Image: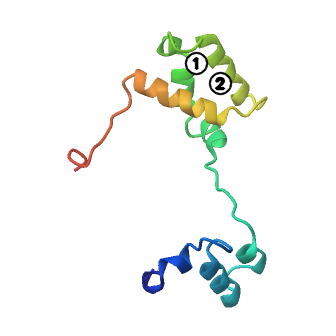
Amino acid sequence: MEFAGRVHASLLTPLRGPDKYLLREQANRSRVIPQPVAVGRKRGFNVPIAKMLRTGLRSLGDSLLLREPDLFAPYFEPGGVRELWLDHQGGRANHGYVLWTLLTLATWRAGRARPRTFLNAA
């Protein structure tokens, strides 16, 4: 961070040329990370939502997505939500991102979401 603070912004985010040139060059020279990683293209990092819904969040999902269908009326068909949940839990499909959104909506509609602000977090 100290080094980046001393470098001109045009070198950190060039208009032309490879992204993160200085970082990649340093990583490649120092051999701290494997060379293919240092020069490789950028890759995304996904949160394992599908797995989380099948493990740690399963009981919440069972409660809200399976047993409280009225939470979705009039926005979604409760039977369709149940079917997505059961297909996902049975390993027949990966509906992780859709179910995450539905679970968030259901949590809010059920009044289980407790927003915290900086003022009342202490």
* Residue at screen point 64% across, 71% down: 19
Secondary structure type for disc 1: helix
* Residue at screen point 38% across, 28% down: 112
Q: Residue furthest bottom?
A: 29
Quarter of the rendering containing residue 76: top right
Quarter of the rendering containing residue 18: bottom right
Q: Amino acid at mark 2?
A: Trp
Dot placed on the residue nearer the N-terminal end, 1 or 2: 1
Left or right for 1, reference 65 = left
Given residues 70 and 42, the one toward you in this image is 42
Label 2 Cα crowd, 10 Å radius (few <14 / some 14-19 / many 20+):
many
* Residue at screen point 53% across, 13% down: 69
Given residues 45 and 120, the one toward you in this image is 45
Given residues 20 and 89, the one toward you in this image is 20
Marks 1 and 2 in Cβ contact (< 8 Å): yes
Question: Against 86, is 49 above or below?
Answer: below
Q: Position of residue 27 (x, y in %)?
A: 65, 83
Q: Amino acid at mark 1?
A: Leu
Question: Against 13, is 28 above or below?
Answer: below
- Residue tagged 2: 85
Label 1 Cα crowd, 10 Å radius (few <14 / some 14-19 / many 20+):
some
